[in-house]
Image: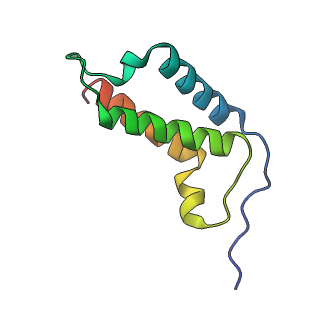
Amino acid sequence: MTPALPSPAAVHWPSLLIALVIMLIGSIYPLLFARADGSADHGLAMALFWAMSAGFVRGVGFVPYALIWRVLFSSWSCLAGLLVAAGLYWGM
């Protein structure tokens, strides 16, 4: 039995726009990734970079064949990364 093929590749604008916004804001205001005392917030950075990576991969239309990569770089993973980042940023 062959595994189900991923959906056909096409630009996914919501994911791509999220990735571009994270990239631009992180480039313009890098203090976003820092705590109040100026030290790096590695958890927040990791969550945002995961969301950005998933957003770029899915946003440009690439859908990996292997299930694990398809899950890690999906639109839902992009959203999950944003929710984790929001929880870490606002202390939820």
In the image, taking residue 3 as reference, residue 33 lies left or right, namely left
Q: Position of residue 35 (x, y in %)?
A: 25, 21
Q: To which quarter of the image does residue 48 belong?
A: top left
The answer to whether residue 79 is visible is no
Residue 6 spot, x, y in % from top left: 72, 61
Vertical arrangement, residue 3 with respect to residue 84, above or below: below
Is 58 left or right of 73, judged from the image as shown?
Answer: right
Residue at 45% from the left image edge and 39% from the top image edge: 81
Looking at the image, residue 5 lies above or below residue 76 = below
Identify the colour scheme used: rainbow
What residue is rendered at 35% in x and 32% in y? Answer: 44
| Quadrant of the image containing the N terminus | bottom right
| Residue 51 against residue 22 in the figure, above or below | below
**Along the horizontal axis of the image, is 70 left or right of 43?**
right
Residue at image coords 31%, 25%: 89
Report the quarter where the C terminus lies: top left
Which residue sits at x=37%, y=16%? 31
Residue 54 location in percent, x, y?
57, 44
Q: Which image quarter: residue 3?
A: bottom right
- Which residue sits furthest bottom? 1
Left or right of 3: which side holds 51? Answer: left
Count of picture labels:
0
> Along the line of sight, which residue is nearer the eye, 38 or 68?
38
Q: Is residue 5 visible?
A: yes
Foreground residue among 92 and 43: 43
In this rendering, is residue 71 above or below 87?
below
